[in-house]
Image: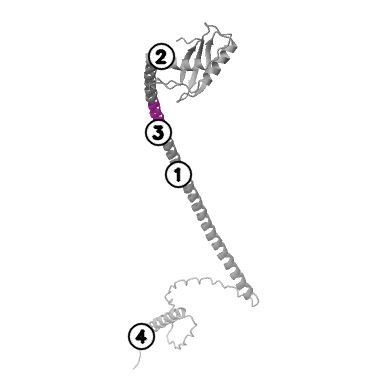
Amino acid sequence: MARSPNNFAPISLAVLLHIALLSSMIVAFDFARPAPITPMAIQATLVIEIPDVKPPVVEREPEPEPKPVIEEPEPEPGNSEELRRQAEEEKRLQDALIEKDRLEKIRQQEEVDRKRKEREDEQRKKDEEARKERDRQEAERKREEDIKRQREENERIRRELEDEQRADEIEDEQQRLAANTSPAMDAYRFTIAQRIRRMWYVPASASEDTLCTLRVRQEAGGEIVGVTILSCNGDDAVKRSVEAAVHRASPLPEPPTPDLFRPILEINLRPEVQN
């Protein structure tokens, strides 16, 4: 079958388009693969003139830049053991610093606790001393009140006793005065004066007007314990003779009734019995 010369142009154009598409696919596939691909050779015989047709431009995406790889220097064969020891020493020092810091914190906390306990103990001691001082002051106040109350009571009892004693003394004095002026007391004094007069060796220097007033102290039973010459108009011989007579008269006669007894008596003595 004979081909018309007018059909060569379209056919040639179609063949060229197929060739361009195939070339584009091959180029794209070649960029997608990491390893180079050897393109296949295509042989074609052009029978007609190829018109000047530019192939379509295929835009390629920019490839990402590869990350830089930091290569660690390989340790030298002789330094690996030294590096290991240095690492261990650094770790030991780091652990020691951590332990030292931990112990320091523990010490600081213990110091804080110790000071707090000291403050609490000191405050507790102050509170205890203050309580003891309050108790002491309260006890001292009560003691002073008791002493004051006891003194007041003793003073009241003393006044009552003094009042009773004064009343008794007044009563005794009244009775004594009454007894001293009673006929019985006069008779008792006359009896004592007679006894002393009988024991008195009157010296020649005494006269009828000689009068000696004596204070005689006696015990129960009439024993003489002392004599004092209150007044005497005689000389020394008369006074000595009177004192000797009183001692020789001991014991004095007992009173007729116990209420007439007086431990101290005043006796008037004359050479002649007069009373």
- In the image, is residue 156 part of the stretch drawn in magenta? yes
Name the residue beneath numbered marker 3.
146
Cα distance in 3D space between marks 3 and 4: 155 Å
Q: Main secondary structure of the magenta part?
A: helix
Tell me the magenta residue range: 141-158
Neighbours of disc 4 within 10 Å: few (<14), some (14-19), many (20+) = few
Q: Quadrant of residue 155?
A: top left
Residue 88 placed where, x, y %?
59, 70
Cα distance in 3D space between marks 4 and 1: 131 Å
Residue at the outermost bottom position: 1
Residue at image location 53% in from the left, 21% down from the top: 248
Residue 260 placed where, x, y %?
40, 20
216 or 76, nearer to the observer: 216
In the picture, measured across the screen, residue 31 lies left or right of residue 203, that is: left
Name the residue beneath numbered marker 2.
186
- Residue 220, compared with residue 115, is above or below; it is above
Name the residue beneath numbered marker 4.
7
- In the image, is residue 249 part of the stretch drawn in magenta? no
Residue at image location 43% in from the left, 38% down from the top: 134
Cα distance in 3D space between marks 3 and 2: 55 Å
- Residue 232, compared with residue 9, is above or below; it is above
The label number, if any, that marks residue 128 in the structure image:
1
| 1 vs 3, front mark | 3
Return the disc, 1 or 3, that comes first in the chain's sequence.
1
